[in-house]
Image (tube, rainbow, N blue to C red):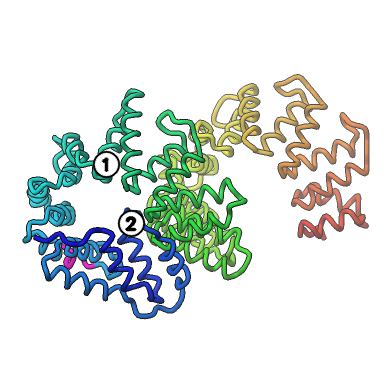
Amino acid sequence: MTEGLNARELNNIVWDVIKDSQNSDDFIGFINHARGTEIDFEKAYDLAEKYWGQPKTESLFPHAVSKLEKSAASGCTTSMLHIGIWHRMGYGVPIDSDKGLAWYKEGMELMDARCFMAYAIGISKSDPNTARHLFKRSTELGNKLAHAYWADLDKEHYMQHLAEGSKDEDPIGLYLYAYELLKRAEKPHETEHALDMMKRAAKEGSTRAAFHVGMIYYYGEHDKVADKTTAEYWYQKGIRRGDFGCYAALGAYLLAWMPERLEEGKRCLTRGAMLGDRIAQYYLGSHLMSKGTSDKERSAGLSWAIKSAEAGHNSAYYLLGQNFLNGTGVLANKELSVYWHKRGAEAGYMYSQCAYGLALVYGEGTKQDLDLAHNLFNAAHLQGSGWGSYLLGMSYHRGDGCEKDLSKAFEFFMEGAKREDTASTFNLATAYLYGEGTEKNIHAALKWFKKASDMGSSSATYYLALMFLTGNGVSADTEKGIELLKEASAGGSSTAMRELGLLYFNGESVTLNMELAKRWMGRAAVNADQVAIDWIKEHCPEKPEWLTNLIQASTKNLE
């Protein structure tokens, strides 16, 4: 056996072959191949971006394969191992699992411990018994890391295997052991020990460890205070070794929290997306579709979002469905909206189940099917979706796809409210107010209206205003009621606008003021409140300039 090439020499061979390529796939293949080694990836990324989306020229990566094949023919097992990895993972060449395994087998015949491990990983699901034997043989040949993968096939000795796999201080072995220790930690010192080990793995070269530590600090997990600066430090460690997940995480963070670093965030997401990370593709697609300033950017956003969805990212199904529904970054198309929401629903994604169910209820972009919609809402509810609980409650409230049952509707509104769903909370309050599916309870109604209002429901704020104006369940307080009506109006409640208009028109609780009445009724009318529309037609037959401007700005037509 001749191990031959080290990582740096191998990287140099590949780079020398592809450096003059004009095919982006060659540079993506190189980055994937070299991931985990500390080299300067910038040139490869720059060239991948330069040629991305251009017509494909001849790939030069097969010439690198040929060079390694010659090296393998001379007995270099490192070359055999990496040719096998390339074929198994599709790095620079089409995926061909059988060809990859054949190269591992060549290395096994020369007793290369790494090839024994790689072959065992490749067959661990299809032939676990043989895989166990090969993992054992790899460890006997001195490769302790094989224990870390053997662990999944020997649950009885799971932690012992992981401990053995970490003993050579291999960064992957360290990470896998630390990850499991962190999951099982019950005391602070156990958590700290596992986290210290994971940090060591990250420093030694495990990009997954760098990503994981970054996420711990980003979200403040395992008793750590959320610290995005520290999270970025660890993401950057992974990025320096070519990790796509760290690019995705850092890019999403920069777009959300650091507008002054917008271009850097987009560049991070672009690199993660090119490497095939579906999370990066999702965030990049979402940003470009909603914030893109040109048709080219919006089109690119759509392309990335579709790639993310085709890779099975549930949020991308929902994003595409909503964007086609609302015309965000694309022309509105209800049929395409249904197509993507249906795919998400079929994948079991609860938000897509809700959205597809709504399309089925109203027959928008698809044939109406109340029974299927009801079942989809129930599936979302069972997964813990507050939105699903609300929609299921509405099914029972209206009798859509089921027998009308106000008691069940109340039950699901209550469940949705517990899950912090705003619409459920509002409907629960109205159920208490009117005694629908439960006993009337004005104090409970007040409690839930208050909560829904605090959650941003302008309708709940409107109801609270009426309760204060009339003294229903609370001490009458005109000043508080008007304040709440204005708050609800600011939140978009046309009924609150109309109520304010009527108060000023009738001089109830406030000084009669026809000008203010017209202005509030005008705002309600352009927000499609029919009572206000009729009032405006009666009291403002010749629309004043301010009302004409308001109508034009709102695109509503009162004629």
Residue 306 place in picture, x, y as percent: 45, 63
For the residue pair 472 and 500, the one nearer the viewer reads as 500
Q: Look at the image and give the residue range highlighted in magenta.
A: 96-102
Q: Quadrant of residue 15?
A: bottom left
Residue 161 visible from this viewpoint: yes
* Mark 2 → mark 1, Cα distance in angstroms: 17 Å
Which residue is outermost to the top? 475
**Circle 1: is it few (<14), some (14-19), or many (20+) Cα within 10 Å?**
many
**Circle 2: is it few (<14), some (14-19), or many (20+) Cα within 10 Å?**
many
Q: Is residue 547 above or below residue 54?
A: above
User: At 56% from the left edge and 51% from the top edge, which residue is drawn?
Assistant: 255
Give whichever of discs 2 and 1 has the lower sequence position: 2
Q: Report which residue position mark 1 lands on.
A: 176
User: At 23% from the left edge and 63% from the top edge, which residue is drawn?
Assistant: 88
Q: Report which residue position mark 2 lands on.
A: 35
User: At 27% from the left edge and 74% from the top edge, which residue is drawn?
Assistant: 62
Q: Is residue 63 left or right of residue 31?
A: left
Q: Is residue 551 left or right of residue 298?
A: right
- The type of residue carrying mark 1 is Leu
Q: Is residue 238 above or below residue 60?
A: above
Main SS, magenta residues: helix
Element at badge 2?
loop
Between disc 2 and disc 1, the foreground one is: 2
Residue 99 place in picture, x, y as percent: 17, 68
Element at badge 1?
helix
Q: Is residue 86 left or right of residue 376?
A: left
Residue 124 located within the stretch drawn in magenta: no
- The type of residue carrying mark 2 is Arg
Q: Quadrant of residue 460?
A: top right
Q: Is residue 230 left or right of residue 440?
A: left
Contact, mark 2 vs mark 1 (Cβ under 8 Å): no
